[in-house]
Amino acid sequence: MSVLTTLTRTWLTRTVKPFTFTSEYDRELPFAECENLGIYVHIPFCRSICAFCPYCKVPYDRELCDRYVDALIREIHATGNTYEGKKKVTSLYFGGGTPALAANRIKEIVNALNDHFTITDGIGLELHPDNVTPETLSVLKDAGVTRISIGIQSFSGKYQSVLGRKKIDTEALQAALRAVPFETVSMDLIFALPGQTFEDLKTDVDTAFSTGANHVAIYPFIDFTFTSSRVPEMPKKQKRELLDRITDYCLGKGYTRNSIWTFSSEPDANYSSMTRENFIGFGCSATSLFRDSFKINTFDVNAYCDRINAGEPATSLTIRFTGRQRMVYWLFWTSYSTRLDPAGFERFFGVPLKKAYGFELWLAGILGFVRKKDGILEMTPKGAFYYHYYENYYTLAYIDKMWGIMRKEAFPDRIEF
Ligand SMILES: C[S@@+](CC[C@H](N)C(=O)[O-])C[C@H]1O[C@@H](n2cnc3c(N)ncnc32)[C@H](O)[C@@H]1O
Ligand code: SF4
């Protein structure tokens, strides 16, 4: 555990008490009172496994996928039945793995969710470039999907081979996207790959927008300790220059920065499963965030199906927050949008942000990380870089450790950070 993350945690939570996750869990999820609630559904199957990828996934197998989706629908009903009537939720996102591999069953899953929830803000789903065909896109559109996100990584053959993926057929991609349009077409790009220049990244961004995207996500490459790939890390100075230049380039083109990693060419294009105040996650490895707790389902696909089929929740670990810990979670997740609304904080916690974190806000202003505009705190490019940088530490200190353990053990007893 890095000294930096321990010190930050102790400072911001005002206690040396660690974040403690244990195997005890709630039978009924406490989502009834949650406002601004999102839903996430995890589909853990891929045609081939990329060595660099940390997510919970297994090679696609039709039978296993069907068994999994049956369990998923059972989990949705088990949770939904605890609420009388239909609960309003903002958005629904399908992530993975590669959810498009279960395209023929997405409608059933959406129908199950519609029995218990009213989704007000559209449905998003992730695809591998190989899934972007008019046939699959039509099936997804028919199931109610309004936004798609495609894992491009890079249009350059050189960087695709660094990542062990194959070159993308841009013409076929463009033709399919023209044939079946969606409100948002987002493309994932990875930056900070070894030797990657600003020109390389700019070409990727331009190609994404000219091939049919109206939204791009530019993720910094993260080298997880438990993955088998060893892609050398780009030095900090070079990374910052690349991020600053691509940010300036996108803003100069008139694109909107919707979140720390994303830019859109059209005002309504949006794809973000991150910035919800509360969310329910269904499926293996899915996380849920409520008023006072956070939980994570098992990473083991078979253990997940067995638990659900036995009428038990598939929860592997739960944390019960102290008030300050929840504030830190709120601030961390909502900061992904690069904007903080002090009124939103006060509505959620009943305490003014200035009272809870006045000194930190003052310091962030002095250091040039945030500025106030129309009552909203906006992250500056410098603040965005340091957020990126800290996020990398956070990912390696918390997510890397937790996922590393959960990939090996379906139901660990306890994890402390
Ligand atoms: C679930 S995948 C997207 C859909 C599909 N499975 C695919 O790969 O095309 C989610 C995204 O996470 C990003 N990602 C995966 N591993 C990463 C890593 N080590 N560092 C940074 N981004 C990563 C990639 O951009 C990837 O497209
Ligand atoms: S990057 Fe996408 S296709 Fe590759 S293993 Fe991860 S989830 Fe699967």
Image: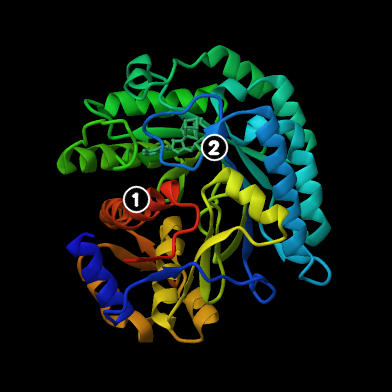
Asked which secondary structure carries label 2, the reply is: loop
State ligand 1's quadrant: top left
Residue at disc 2, CB closer than 8 Å to ligand 2:
yes
Between 198 and 45, the one lying in front of the other is: 45
Tell me which corner region of the image, top left, top right, bottom left or bottom right, holds residue 50. Answer: top left
Is residue 385 rendered to the left or right of residue 254? left
Q: Amino acid at mark 1?
A: Asp
Name the quarter where the N terminus is drawn. Answer: bottom left
Between 299 and 324, the one lying in front of the other is: 299
Q: Which residue is mark 2?
A: 97
Residue 198 x, y percent position in the rendering: 27, 29
Asked which secondary structure carries label 1, the reply is: helix
Label located before the other in sequence (2 or 1) = 2
Which disc number belongs to residue 400? 1
The residue sitting at 58% across, 44% down in the picture is 301
Tell me which corner region of the image, top left, top right, bottom left or bottom right, holds residue 200. Answer: top left
Name the quarter where the C terminus is drawn. Answer: bottom left
Residue 242 x, y percent position in the rendering: 25, 37
Which disc number belongs to residue 275? none
